[in-house]
Structure formats: structure tokens, C-alpha cells
Amino acid sequence: MSARTGATPGDRTEGRIVFDQVTKTFPRQGKRDEPTSALRGVSLDVAPGTIFGVIGYSGAGKSTLIRMVNGIERPTAGHVVVDGVDVGALRGSALRTAQKRTGMIFQQFNLLETVRVRDNVAMPLRLDGVGARTARARAEEVLDFVGLGAKAGSFAGELSGGQKQRVGIARALVRNPRILLSDEATSALDPTTTAQIIDLLRSINTEYGTTILVVTHEMDVIKDLAHEVAVMADGEIVEQGTVLDTFLHPRSPVTRDFVTTVVPQGLPDRVVEHLGGDGLWRLLLVDDEVTQPLLSGLITEIGVSVNMLHADMTEIQDHTVGQMIIKVTGPEERVAAARAYLEQRVVHVEEVAR
Amino acid sequence: MITATTPPWTLITPELFLKALGETLQMLGVSLVLGSILGVLIGAVLALTRAGGVLENRPISLGLAVVVNLIRSLPFIILLVAILPFTRLLVGTSIGVWAAIVPLTVMIAPYIGRLVENSLLEVPRGVIEAARAMGASPLQIFWRFMLPEARGSLILAVTIASVGLLDATAMAGTVGAGGIGDLALSYGYQRYDGFAMVITVVTLIVLVQGIQLLGTIVARRFRRR
Ligand SMILES: Nc1ncnc2c1ncn2[C@@H]1O[C@H](COP(=O)(O)OP(=O)(O)OP(=O)(O)O)[C@@H](O)[C@H]1O
Ligand SMILES: [Mg+2]
């Protein structure tokens, strides 16, 4: 990996992915007039050196989307432009040349079972006509980088899921690509292994400035890895923004559902039923907001009584995000004053509706 | 024709037996090699050109499938006589071992082709997707991904085909190619030589068992670890 050492994300000019009004339909067996719409007018701009997450439920069109970046799938309409090249318009060897500038990893790893780990990793170079010795030496270098140097001589069947994915990552990196595509790369792994793979992907991004496009249905992956996120539903992007912003102010119902998987709305339904409505508020606090004397302020300055029902904290993109659910009681105009007091001091206040 | 080396209760001499065994092995070996080469080609074309394959091509895929099914629908004994003019054109004669090798090869190649197609289709879609993602050409996908990943199952396919071939060589006597099967028919059956029948049957059983055992062992070694 020596050639690119020292590059920081900001330095990168290569690795931009632009989707311009991309539509994809698949013919449906027996129903020629009603094709499946996998993508409906998707537009995206992934800046060089960023980690961009795409999240959506099964069938949302995530795989279709990511597979267009390396041209294994072609748009029905619109353009997918990678570093100025309209990938969907390429054919034959021009397409293959473009494909060699991206690496891809998969949920099922997709390694060859009949050759050793180092030959799996060396395969892309062998396809390029690099000699066996040189390719293997380079493969072992990358295997060392992903922490699997000791397994170079093993077969895929002898490795754990996490180790297999490291081999997959090494294989994807062996050509020093500008772009790394990850289609549910951690979905077959347990939480601990997932965290390790996420750390590895992040270090690839910081060390080599590789643009990483991550497709997942796990909001945890987005939270821990991505800088920006697009939420997909039914072939469309329903919401897009920085990860922190999306967590703090989810707008669409789908996004809210995904956010809830990481920051659970912490009250049992029975409690909400009982206390819900005026004065039952959910607060989100970022970084320093978390440490201010908020509740004592409400009590002494506004003169309401406060009951704390739930509090938790999580880390999102180097920011501390706290959540509190409180019940404020007092005269109506005092409760309103309390709300105004909070809105000045925390990033988000909302009523927990019954 | 009783010679000094033959016990009085059989007509078969060791020379006769060894000659027949040699003919069988020659027919089996040559048509298996030729049939496997053609079969892998046929199987590759079928697997690559089918709908969703990396070289999707409907006319070629359909055309080849028709030819393959056509040949496979003929009983071997009929194929053998039906293509006699073609055999004569190819090897210059319509009798003897080589005259049997041509129809044996024609018979076994499409059969192996179908088995190879199935083996290649067993290679996980994800592996092909990974190959395409790294910019492999269709030929590289076949040669470096599909063929190695399928090799265990390919060996088993060839094993099955060998047993089928051995079966067919019994009919090679029709064109005077000899072989173990011919020995059984012309001595054991037509001349009521019980010993000839026993020894040919035992030989065929041993051959089949041997082929199967060898195939299984080699396939296991080549299989994924
Ligand atoms: N080759 C294909 N032929 C026909 N329909 C397809 C094909 N590929 C995808 N689709 C359809 O397109 C839609 C989107 O599929 P896609 O695989 O992109 O979803 P996804 O978001 O990746 O789902 P998952 O999380 O299950 O992987 C689905 O309705 C799917 O059935
Ligand atoms: Mg998918």
C-alpha cells in the first residue's frame, strides 16, 4: 500500500461518484408491461475520500445502486459517473478497465474455495497479467495490512467469517483502488466482528483516502462508519445528509425507524399511554449540551417540576449524543416557558405523543 | 479352437482375453479424452451463453441445446450405425477399434457437456459477481473462477461418463472392434462358454468399481477444503 501512503481525504481528487437521475427497471417474468422498478430517479454525489452510507430495507434497491458504480448493472435511464467517466456507457474492455479502478466486498465474501488465501488476494493482479511471484508478494503485503498475514497459506474454508471478510477486503484493495464498494459486508458477522471490520474500513479511508460507498440495512454501521447517509425506500432516496444531522433530525418515517434502532425511544408503550401529551418531552443533546445543568435550571429558573424518565448516550461521528425523556408539570404557561428554555439549550425537543 | 494353454472347459485363451481387455481400454481411454475435451467445450458454451450467463446468447444456447438433445435421444447402437458414413470419412474405415471410437466420442461428448454445464452452474453466483466486479473477461471468468471452483464436481462428472462409456463399448462388436463385451457376447452367449461369461462379467465389474473409486478419490482431493 506504499504508493498512496500519506494521502489525506482532503487531498483526493479521484474517487468521486455521481448518480444523475438513475432509473433501473427489471423485466418481470410473464408481466412484460409491469417491470420491477429497482431505482426511480436516484441522484447522489459522493465526494472523493468520504465514507458514504446508503441504508434501506430489503428490496429498496441498494444492491442495484452499488452495482452500477462498477458497471455490473447498467442504468435503464440516467448516468452513473465515476471520476468523469459515464460507467453505464462503457462496454467490453473499456468497462473492464474502469472496473479495475474500484474494489468491492460482499456479504457472502465470495472467495474462491479451491485456492489459497494469498492466491485469492492476488487474483485481480493475475487477471491483469502480473506474474505469480510479484502478485503473491503484493498480496501478502495487503494481507499484512488487514491483519491476516499469518493466514496467507490457508484455504477460505479454514477461516472464520471475519477473517474471510478481511481476505475479501485485501482482495478489493490489492490494486490500490480509489473507490471501495461494500454491499452488506458486515451483515453476516456478529457484533464484535462487525466492529472490527468497521474499524478496518475506517482506517483504509483515513490512511489512503479511499472513497467508501457502504450499503447496509444496519443503522449501527452507518452510525459507526459513515460521514454521510442516504436513506432509500422503494427505489428512491427519501432523505440524505450528514450522519449526525440525520440522527438528530430524521424527517421521513423510514429514517425515524432506522434511527430508533440505534437510539431507542426508551419508554414502554404503557408509560407513554399514561403520561403522554403535554410536558412529556424527548430531548436530544449534542456534545457540551450534555453536561449543562439543564434540569436544575428548569426547576429553579422556570419553576416547574421535572421527572426524569429515561436517559442514554451514544457516540455518532465523534460527537456525543444524549437523549433524555422528561415529564414536566406545572401551570400551563410555565410548561410553555420550560419548552422555550429547553429549545434554546438543546438541539432537539419533541413531544412524545400518546 | 482349443490350444494347449486353454483348459478344456473354456474357449478363451489368455491372449484372447488380454487382447479384448486392451481393445476395451483403448476405446474407453481415447473416447474419454476426446469426449471430455469436447464435453468441457460444450458445457462451457451452454453455461456461458444461457440466459443470465456472462456471454448470454440465445441463438447459440438454443442451437447447441437442440444438437445435444438430439444426439442424446438416440440409443447408442443406432447412433453407431447411423453415423457410419461420417466415421468412414473421419478414420477411413468402418470396422475396428477406431471405427468404434468415433461414435463413442460423439455419444459421450454431449453427455459430458450436460454434466459439465451442471457443474459450472453450481459455482455460486457470488463468485461470478466478484469476478465481474474485478473486471475479469468472460474467458477469465470461465478459466480462473468457474473451472477451478467446479473441478471436484467435474471429476465426478467424468467418472459417471466413463461408466456409461464402458457400457457402450460392449456394443462395439457390431463394428468389429472387439473388447470385453464382445467376448461375452460371442463366446459366453453364442457359444455357451460359461467361464467366458463369468470372467468378462467379473472384469467389467472390477473396471467399473475401479473407475468409480478412482474418480471419488481424485474428486475428494480436488474438492473445496
Ligand atoms: N436481476 C434482477 N432481475 C429482476 N429483478 C431484480 C434483479 N435484481 C434486483 N431486482 C429487484 O429489484 C429490487 C431491488 O433489489 P436489490 O437487490 O437492489 O435490493 P436490496 O436493497 O439490495 O435488497 P437486500 O437488502 O435484500 O439485498 C427488488 O424488488 C428485486 O426483486
Ligand atoms: Mg442487496
Image (cartoon, rainbow, N blue to C red):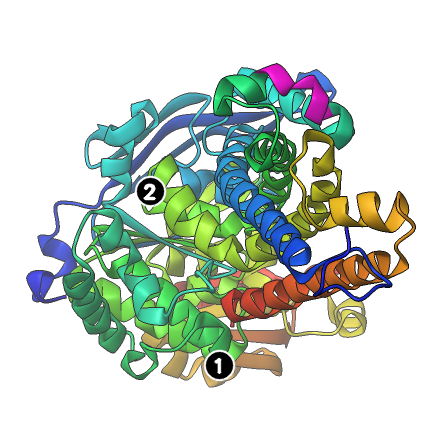
> Would you call the spot at circle 1 few (<14 residues within 10 Å), some (14-19), or many (20 or more)?
few
Say which residue appears at 60% left-offset and 51% top-offset.
B158
Residue A268 lies left or right of residue A305; in this view the side is right
Q: Is residue A348 magenta?
A: no
Q: Position of residue A118 (x, y in %)?
A: 30, 69
Residue B169 lies left or right of residue A139; in this view the side is right
- Looking at the rendered structure, the number of numbered marks drawn on it comes to 2
Instruction: Residue A35: tell me if it is visible.
Output: no
Say which residue appears at 71% left-offset and 64% top-offset.
B4
Q: Measured along the vertical axis of the image, is residue B92 above or below residue A111?
A: above
Ligand 1: give its quadrant: top right
Residue type marked 1? Thr
Q: Measured along the vertical axis of the image, is residue A73 above or below residue B204?
A: above
> Would you call the spot at circle 2 few (<14 residues within 10 Å), some (14-19), or many (20 or more)?
many
- Residue B136 image label: 2
Magenta: main secondary structure:
helix
Query: Which residue is label 1 attached to?
Result: A192
Q: Measured along the vertical axis of the image, is residue A249 above or below residue A117?
A: above
Q: Measured along the vertical axis of the image, is residue A158 above or below residue B88?
A: below
Q: Position of residue A237 (x, y in %)?
A: 48, 38
Q: Dividing the picture into quarters, in which one does residue A68 lie?
A: top left
- Residue A113 image label: none
- Image: magenta residue range: B79-85
Label 1's element? helix
The residue closer to the viewer here, A244 or B182, is B182
Query: Are the residues under badges 2 and 1 in a single subunit?
Result: no
Q: CA distance from mark 2 to mark 1?
A: 34 Å
Q: Chain of mark 1?
A: A
Label 2's element? loop
* Residue that lies at the very extreme toward the front in this rendered image: B4
Residue type marked 2? Ala
